[in-house]
């Protein structure tokens, strides 16, 4: 994550904290990284650190909010593209590639595992997934020229499947020798899922 020098100091400090949290979660795991560990990485006292975030759940929520802001921009660009389904394919492929290169997969693997054990993390992660699914359904509706309600009734499962495949692919270790082959297989199945939506939309039309 790039930290902008012209942002307000408090916002820049928050961004630095979140970047340190990402590193701490990647290095020690969600449960292994304490608030003290994250504070030390930022060069802050624990007392001062708690002025920004009161818990790891609050940090996760802020990390997700940052990623959602970026995804909102991606979805907005897709919706104004003349071929939204092709734009979606390209965006998904880019996101998967970025996850491999950037090493964020390990962080989200930790957060996903924590979501299964900790209800507050689970609720935060569910809201993120539900938001992504809602955007996907809106794209499907526009591409198929149907209402959002109809797209939701027909392709909600497809949207959840896409989220599941992207998330699972992104969480693969970058040093796994089969990761590249797995990525190709996932992308193939993502494209088949999108083809299924396009085919069913054309058949009805």
Image (spheres, rainbow, N blue to C red):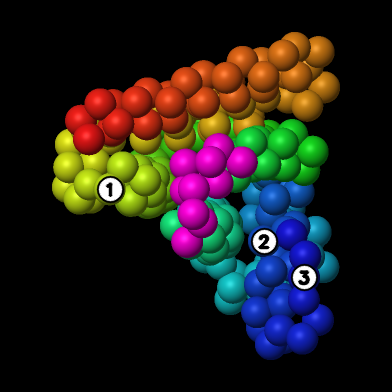
Q: CA distance from mark 2 to mark 1?
A: 40 Å
The dot on residue 3 is: 3
Q: Earlier in the sequence, mark 3 or mark 1?
A: 3
User: Where is residue 201 shown, x and y percent of the image?
Assistant: 28, 33
Residue bearing mark 1:
145
Snapshot quadrant of residue 91: top right
Q: Is residue 129 above or below residue 40?
A: above
Within 10 Å of the Cα at label 3, are there few (<14), some (14-19), or many (20+) other Cα atoms?
few
Task: Give residue 18's mark.
Answer: 2
| Image: magenta residue range | 80-90
Q: Nearer the viewer, residue 11 or 143?
A: 143
State the SS at label 3. loop
* Disc with the residue nearer the chain's start (2 vs 1): 2
Residue drawn at (69%, 54%) of the image: 21
Q: Is residue 66 visible?
A: yes
Q: Quadrant of the N terminus?
A: bottom right
Mark 2 secondary-structure assignment: helix
Does 28 sit above or below residue 185?
Answer: below
* Mark 2 surroundings within 10 Å by alpha-carbon count, few (fewer than 14), some (14 through 19), many (20 or more): many
Magenta region's main secondary structure? helix
x and y percent of residue 84 in the render? Answer: 47, 48
Reading the chain from its start, which is encountered first: label 2 or label 3? 3
Q: Quadrant of the C terminus?
A: top left
Residue 134 visible here: no
Relative side of 53 to 124, left or right = right
């Amino acid at each position: 994550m790039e930290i902008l020098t012209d942002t307000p100091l408090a916002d820049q400090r928050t961004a630095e904290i979140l970047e340190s949290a990402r590193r701490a979660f990647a290095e020690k795991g969600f449960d292994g990284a304490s608030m003290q560990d994250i504070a030390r990485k930022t060069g802050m006292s624990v007392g001062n650190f708690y002025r920004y975030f009161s818990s790891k759940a609050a940090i996760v929520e802020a990390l997700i909010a940052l990623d959602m802001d970026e995804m909102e921009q991606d979805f907005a660009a897709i919706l104004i593209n003349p071929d939204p389904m092709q734009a979606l394919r390209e965006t998904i492929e880019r996101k998967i590639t970025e996850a491999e290169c950037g090493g964020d997969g390990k962080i989200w693997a930790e957060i996903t595992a924590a979501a299964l054990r900790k209800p507050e993390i689970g609720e935060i992660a569910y809201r993120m997934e539900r938001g992504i699914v809602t955007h996907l359904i809106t794209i499907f509706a526009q591409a198929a020229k149907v209402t959002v309600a109809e797209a939701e009734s027909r392709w909600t499962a497809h949207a959840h499947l896409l989220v599941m495949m992207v998330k699972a692919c992104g969480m693969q270790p970058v040093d796994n020798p089969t990761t590249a082959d797995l990525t190709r297989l996932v992308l193939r199945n993502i494209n088949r899922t999108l083809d299924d939506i396009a085919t069913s939309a054309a058949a009805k039309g």
